[in-house]
Amino acid sequence: MIDLDDLDRLILRALYADAGLSAGELGRRLGLSQPATWRRIKRLEEAGVINGRRVEVDRAALGFGVTVFLGVKLATKGRVSLEDFERAVTAIPEVQVVQHVLGLFDYRLRVVARDIADFERVLRRRIMTLPGVGQVEANVLLTEERRPGPIG
Amino acid sequence: MQIDDTDRRILRHHLAEPGLDRASLAERAGVTPATLWRRLERLTEGGVITATGAVIDWRAMGYEVEVSLRFTLDKTNPRAFDEFLAASRDVPEVVAIETFLGRVDVRLNVIARDMRHYQEIYRRRILTLPHITDIEALMLIATIKDDTGLPL
């Protein structure tokens, strides 16, 4: 595991908010030279702490007004049914996130849709027809906020 | 803001693979690099692209445990949501906060170094949050799919 100092955390926090920041710009903010900043970023990338980029969009402006989280319980269990379910569910374009969880449900899904009617179509035609699917619970997302967590 | 097919094509590829460099993205979207640059600027200024942030792998920072905690709040108190959300923001191990319409009111994503650390956070920081009437925990086993792609 990588050891992080305060400067590393500041760098992570800045890049978490804006991945497009150049090493020079970031260094100026932190009072660090461009090469020193670049070396630190490189080290964080190599350790896998920085793991790619995420583009966030105004989904509503693009016509996707509804985001729903589904808790899915499988009706039948066993290795084969998990694999079948996972293969089928990841292929659905409206499903952004698939997480295998332990607890009340077996899977958590994040589903985007144009509106509630469109969500109903996705739910009925795509989700309820998945292999092995059992009980499903839906919660409509109202707000979401990403926090800097331990780098804050 | 008006969004045309070229914007949608660019966004579809950009969201599907946010780490792609500009030249490859232009090629995939079938536009010139100059057009791509202009379109991305316009989409950002128009508020369609809201942020481009680094993805941080908490696991690479030594946080092995991730739990999704689902809360039901005491809705008889009109300040319940605001006070609960404000208190959650003070917990450094909370990396995401979502509010819902449904059986669940709020969901927090909590990370911890190990189970012992999680137990400590749960007892000291989570159970002490205000206005909770019920909590359910889903422990993350694996993320099978996590992308920001939209079926544009």
Image (cartoon, grey):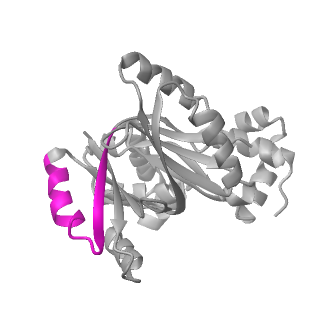
Q: Which span of residues is magenta-colored? A: B116-140
User: Image point 16% across, 65% down: which residue?
Assistant: B124
Q: x%, y% of residue B131?
A: 30, 74
Q: x%, y% of residue B82?
A: 41, 78
Is B118 magenta? The answer is yes
Q: Is residue A41 left or right of residue B66?
A: right
> Where is residue A122, by image quadrant?
top right
Q: Quadrant of the C terminus of chain A?
A: bottom left
Q: Is residue B26 left or right of residue A80?
A: right
> Where is residue B92, by image quadrant?
bottom left
Q: Is residue A41 left or right of residue B115?
A: right
Choose between A69 and A2: the one closer to the eye: A69
Q: x%, y% of residue B96?
A: 41, 58
Q: Is residue A13 above or below residue B9?
A: below
Choose between B103 and A113: the one closer to the eye: B103
Q: x%, y% of residue A54?
A: 55, 48
User: Image point 70% across, 48% down: which residue?
Assistant: A118
The answer to whether residue A62 is seen in the rendering is yes
Residue most toward the top? A80
Q: Quadrant of the N terminus of chain A?
A: top left
User: Image point 85% across, 45% down: which residue?
Assistant: B5
User: Image point 66% across, 54% down: which residue?
Assistant: A116
Q: Is residue A34 above or below residue A127?
A: below
